[in-house]
Image: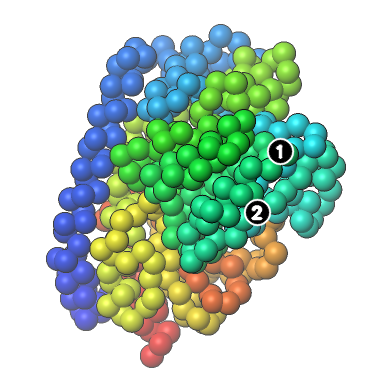
Amino acid sequence: MLSHSLLQLAAEAEGKIAPRFAAIDGISQRATGRVLEAFARHRVSDACFAGTTGYGYDDAGREKLEAIYADVFGCESALVRQGFVNGSHAIGCAMLAGMQMGDTLLSATGPVYDTLQTLLGKRGPVGGTFPEQGLGYREVALRGGRPDLPAIEKAAAAADVAVVFVQRSRGYGTRESLAPEDIGQLVQVVRAVNPRAAVVVDNCYGEFCADTEPTHHGADLICGSLIKNPGGGLAPAGGYIAGRADLVARVANRMSIPGIGGECGPTLGLSRLMFQGFFMAPHTVAQALKTATFAAALLESLGCTVSPRWEEARPDIIQTVAFGEPAPLLAFCRGIQAGAPVDSFATPEPWDMPGYDCPVVMAAGAFVQGASIELSCDAPMRPPYTAYMQGGLTYESGKYGILRAAQALMEAQI
């Protein structure tokens, strides 16, 4: 039972965030218009949903969906496939597609995300890592939580730098996420000193959070997961890469083999969900942004440290809540789980999740396993014990999940 005092705080929070909701609705409306215009230009019909099996040759629906992604994201080409097992898979393929033996990848936003550390040869099993392929890696530390443009300019000028990598979201960090315009400034810096370097952006959690995407501001490739924003809560698996046609073709060659590239790949009856998910994506992302905004306002009133704050712009759907110690963090995650439509009876416990260097607790009662466009909350069990919350297929369900988490937090503190 939700307490009367909590419901009163929730009503007060909703009252003050109404202008932010209006701004979010405006972004969603404009993005929906762009998606519908692209569907019309590419003449989407019921025949596009038929799907293919086997090799997947001449899959007209797959080809149209990829053309629509490229159209909406303002670039030349796209690869949208359920064969990408997660966002990290798509990102890794994008990184490697722009490199040859002897080349170096420069991370312009500090260390890469945890699940990419093994690819770089930093830890874990061997097999296809950067060092084994004769590839180098360097990174530029953030300055004050923001990209250090002068340092990036100096580092990107090196002759061996073939890819400059940008992570749009904060990952498991405390820095601010980057807006597409921020990435555009970084692109200009790189272009001035190294025109051949491809700027590759991990766009996870950021799609449809603003009126533009990084490709509208000069990024060569963007990539992400279909069980995050662009799948709209309907795509059951997969990822995408969009950008320069030559680089997308190289990604397709790496995903399959040269000579086949993107010509194969059956859609196995999933085309309708892929199309419908992308159609729903702007609205679904708006629901997630509203959920995060409400969470920030409510939890701040309870004395929590949140980022972004409710009145701040949101370049992605991630909301952080810093607890400083493990007990309230676990209580909060367990409250999120209790408010989920699936597995609400489960109790999240920290575990050694593949790709991470410490136990991770994850609350995710989702219809699609691991779908972080559905309300979820996860955290590495290490100081400063910060929860990373994202998603919400509907604001109403997202709000309920936040209320259950806030109630659990209040009870834990008693």
Q: Which badge, 1 or 2, comes first in the chain's sequence? A: 2
The answer to whether residue 224 shows anywhere in this view is no
Q: Which of 195 and 42 is in front in this view?
A: 195
Q: Is residue 253 above or below residue 383?
A: above
In x, y percent, where is residue 272? 42, 25
Q: How many marks?
A: 2
Quadrant in which residue 165 is drawn: top right
Direction from residue 203 to residue 361 in the image, left or right: right
Quadrant in which residue 233 is drawn: top left
- The numbered dot on residue 159 is 1
* Amino acid type, callout 2: Glu
Direction from residue 356 to residue 210 in the image, left or right: left
Q: Which residue lies furthest to the bottom in this view?
A: 414
Q: Residue at x 60, y 36 (%)?
A: 194
Residue at the disc numbered 2: 139
In x, y percent, where is residue 300? 31, 75
Disc 1 crowd, CA 10 A, few/some/many (<14, 14-19, 20+)? few
Q: Is mark 1 on a helix, strand or loop?
A: loop
* Distance CA(mark 1)–CA(mark 2): 15 Å
Say if mark 1 contacts mark 2, CB within 8 Å: no
Q: Residue at x 16, y 66 (%)?
A: 16
Q: Is residue 260 above or below residue 194?
A: above
In x, y percent, where is residue 62? 50, 19
Quadrant in which residue 88 is drawn: top right
The answer to whether residue 9 shows anywhere in this view is yes
